[in-house]
């Protein structure tokens, strides 16, 4: 499978507005669609592609194609000069297999693609998953490990669905700082949610976070914000943050 070799050497369209006019938002979408079509037709190493990239994204145009990607299912405008869009990397059969985040910057009226990110360093995790799935019988500990890996490697859409299916459990997590979980609750919630339900103070906001898993700084998790503020998105730390409810969000880091 060829997917994003530069990095690795359905929702309706969502738009979060911050200091961007409708015309500027439309221009950002147009530039990204142009890039996506050039990628789709294997024309990234052409002058039209080089005209709409900047920074590290210039390196992408040394390839004919990054790999097949879907149309965007989300567009976020964090501030007056930046935009982030989410697409899915596709298998050879066209199935979505990974979320990919493209970052755009604006200078004057011109938008250019500046970076892309996805959850990195998942190779070993995928190998462990494959080994567990091949075993004819799993121990309770192995079943829990496999459930956690599946959640870790999930698309954002699956993480949203997981939250929606388990809202009562997440509501209990939100109170766990002032009403600590009993050992019985810890065991039950870990099995139900497929991650460690013990809370930790948020490094990115004013509430709590729960890390599903990851390697080094490449993590996936859920966050609870007391104020309802989402952490800022950038290609250098939190590569994606998405609201799930007035106070809950999912996030990815790099």
Image: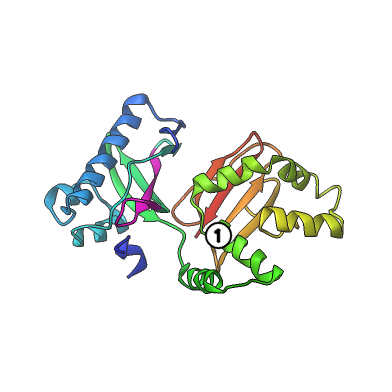
Give the camera-side residue of 231 and 138: 138
Give the camera-side residue of 52 and 155: 155
* Depicted 190 relative to depicted 76: above or below: below
Residue 213 location in percent, x, y? 60, 62
Residue 189 location in percent, x, y? 75, 54
Q: Quadrant of the N terminus?
A: bottom left
Magenta stretch: dominant secondary structure: strand
Identity of the residue drawn at 80% across and 49% down: 176
Give the magenta range: 81-96
Magenta-span inclusion, residue 85: yes
Residue 3 occupies quadrant: bottom left
Please give left or right for residue 120 compared with residue 170 in the image.
left
Residue 194 occupies quadrant: bottom right
Asked if one can make out residue 38 in the rendered structure from this viewpoint, the answer is yes
Residue 71 location in percent, x, y? 32, 41
Extreme residue toward the front, this view = 136
Extreme residue toward the left, this view = 47
Identity of the residue drawn at 15% across and 52% down: 43
Extreme residue toward the top, this view = 22
Element marked by disc 1:
helix
Q: Which residue is mark 1?
A: 150
Please give left or right for residue 15 compared with residue 6 in the image.
right
Give the camera-side residue of 11 and 5: 11
Identity of the residue drawn at 33% across and 45% down: 70
Please give left or right for residue 3 compared with residue 191 in the image.
left
Give the crowd class for mark 1: few <14, some 14-19, many >=20 residues within 10 Å.
some
Magenta-span inclusion, residue 76: no
Check the image and tell me how it is coloured.
rainbow
């Amino acid at each position: 499978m060829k997917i994003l070799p530069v990095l690795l050497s359905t929702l309706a369209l969502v738009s979060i507005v911050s200091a961007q006019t409708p015309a500027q938002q439309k221009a950002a979408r147009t530039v990204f669609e142009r890039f996506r079509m050039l990628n789709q037709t294997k024309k990234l190493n052409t002058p039209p592609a080089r005209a709409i990239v900047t920074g590290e994204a210039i390196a992408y145009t040394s390839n004919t194609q990054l790999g097949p990607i879907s149309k965007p299912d989300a567009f976020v405008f964090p501030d007056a000069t930046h935009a982030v869009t989410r697409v899915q990397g596709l298998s050879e059969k066209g199935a979505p297999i990974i979320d990919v985040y493209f970052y755009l910057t604006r200078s004057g009226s011109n938008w250019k693609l500046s970076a892309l990110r996805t959850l990195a360093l998942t190779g070993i995790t995928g190998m462990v998953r494959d080994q567990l799935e091949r075993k004819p019988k799993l121990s309770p500990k192995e079943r829990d490990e496999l459930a956690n890996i599946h959640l870790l490697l999930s698309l954002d859409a699956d993480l949203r669905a997981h939250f929606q299916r388990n809202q009562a459990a997440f509501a209990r997590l939100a109170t766990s700082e002032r009403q600590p979980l009993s050992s019985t609750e810890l065991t039950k919630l870990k099995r139900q949610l497929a991650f460690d339900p013990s809370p930790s103070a948020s490094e990115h906001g004013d509430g709590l976070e729960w890390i599903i898993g990851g390697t080094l700084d490449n993590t996936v998790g859920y966050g609870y914000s007391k104020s309802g503020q989402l952490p800022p998105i950038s290609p250098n730390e939190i590569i994606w943050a998405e609201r799930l409810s007035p106070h809950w969000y999912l996030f990815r880091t790099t």
